[in-house]
């Protein structure tokens, strides 16, 4: 079984990005809007600041109170849209209940949409004319490319239909001629689908959701899930899937490092215009 080593790919990519940013003298500034004090968001934002800094990108973090009114957030997004010193803007999820992540993300200008969530960027992906695509989706595609895993003609089951992972991932893989089944919380008998799949991608956030009796021999597993069990970081796959996998992403060290790398790649693309 081959471990799909996102951490190793990240280290190689960071070197490359650092060189590009230095050589082309790109002055990149990322604005991160974080609302509330969610512990996962604190970790995600901290990592984004650390890794962008490593390659010479500046960040401005707008940490706003939990009870923020929607209009105040809209005003901030508009200000950042109009600020020529800002290269990219992202709204960190999860958000407090009174705020609508989809609505707020779609207010970001296409030219600053580092997460690929604006209507035009999502439609371009749907239309097989990809521009900026969501970072986790792009990270998974990069893993396939790096390990020379062709998805064309493959039977791929994605579990999770969120706007940031499952749905855009389905579009991206259809663009690459894979056959896609998208499962979600209302899908009955998920194992009926996963047991037939060449590749299983889980983006749910439930530990041990996928076990070895649900997958076929030599399957390829991509684990997007982030869960904490007794203080330990785990994905959605049970340990025992290792017995059947041909390739597998670890958690930590698989998809996570790729997401942060693709954030940087998208920022470079936005800066170059
Ligand atoms: P989300 O909560 O928006 O979506 C979860 C999806 O899982 C939903 O579509 C839901 O229908 C489905 N689901 C819920 N319970 C299910 C079940 N029992 N069976 C099948 N499907 C079920 O989540 P999201 O933002 O897409 O994130 C999903 C997971 O991926 C989370 O653990 C998140 O932390 C993680 N994540 C990781 C990265 C990374 O870089 N590694 C990036 C984004 C998200």
Image (cartoon, helix red, strand yellow):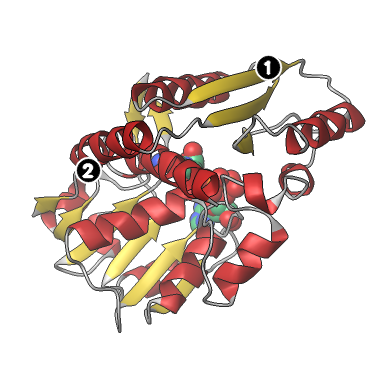
x and y percentages locating residue 122 in the rendered image: 62, 63
**In which quarter of the view is residue 19 placed?**
top left
x and y percentages locating residue 86 in the rendered image: 64, 32
| Residue at the spot 10% in from the left edge and 53% down from the top edge | 2
Disc 2 residue crowd, few under 14, some 14–19, many 20+, Cα 10 Å: some
Say whether residue 240 is left or right of residue 252: left
How far is mark 1 from mark 2, CA to CA?
30 Å
Q: Nearest the camera: 269 or 239?
A: 269
Q: Which mark is residue 172?
A: none
| Residue at the spot 30% in from the left edge and 71% down from the top edge | 195
Say whether residue 67 is left or right of residue 180: right
Q: Closer to the N terminus: mark 1 or mark 2?
A: 2
x and y percentages locating residue 256 in the rendered image: 36, 38
**In which quarter of the view is residue 211 placed?**
bottom left
Say whether residue 87 is left or right of residue 175: right
Tell me the SS state at disc 2: helix
Q: Which mark is residue 63?
A: 1
Disc 1 residue crowd, few under 14, some 14–19, many 20+, Cα 10 Å: some
x and y percentages locating residue 59 in the rendered image: 54, 22
Q: Which mark is residue 9?
A: 2
Q: Is residue 34 above or below residue 101?
A: above
Q: Nearest the camera: 184 or 249?
A: 249
Residue 118 visible in the displayed image: yes
Residue 210 visible in the displayed image: no
Number of numbered discs visible in the structure rendering: 2
Q: Is residue 56 above or below residue 216?
A: above
| Residue at the spot 37% in from the left edge and 67% down from the top edge | 191
Determine contact: label 1, label 2, CB under 8 Å. no
- Residue found at the far left of this picture: 1
């Amino acid at each position: 079984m081959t471990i799909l080593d996102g951490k190793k790919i990240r280290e190689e990519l960071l070197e490359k990005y650092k060189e590009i940013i230095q050589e082309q003298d790109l002055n990149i500034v990322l604005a991160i809007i974080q609302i509330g004090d969610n512990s996962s968001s604190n970790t995600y934002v901290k990592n984004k600041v650390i890794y962008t800094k490593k390659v010479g990108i500046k960040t401005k973090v707008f940490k706003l109170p939990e009870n923020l009114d929607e209009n105040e957030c809209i005003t901030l997004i508009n200000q950042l849209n109009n600020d020529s010193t800002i290269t990219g803007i992202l709204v960190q999820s999860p958000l407090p209940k009174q705020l609508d992540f989809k609505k707020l993300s779609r207010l970001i200008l296409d030219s600053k949409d580092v997460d690929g969530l604006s209507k035009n960027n999502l439609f371009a992906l749907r239309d097989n004319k990809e521009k900026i695509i969501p970072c986790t989706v792009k990270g998974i595609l990069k893993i396939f490319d790096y390990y020379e895993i062709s998805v064309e003609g493959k039977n791929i089951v994605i579990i999770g239909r969120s706007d940031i992972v499952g749905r855009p991932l389905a579009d991206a893989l259809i663009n690459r001629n894979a056959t896609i089944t998208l499962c979600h919380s209302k899908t009955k008998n998920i194992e009926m689908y996963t047991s037939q799949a060449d590749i299983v991608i889980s983006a749910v956030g439930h530990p041990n959701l996928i076990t070895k009796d649900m997958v076929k021999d030599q399957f390829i597993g991509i684990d997007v899930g982030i869960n904490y069990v007794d203080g330990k970081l785990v994905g959605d796959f049970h340990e025992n899937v290792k017995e059947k996998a041909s390739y597998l992403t670890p958690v930590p060290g698989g998809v996570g490092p790729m997401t942060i790398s693709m954030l940087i790649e998208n920022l470079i693309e936005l800066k170059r215009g």
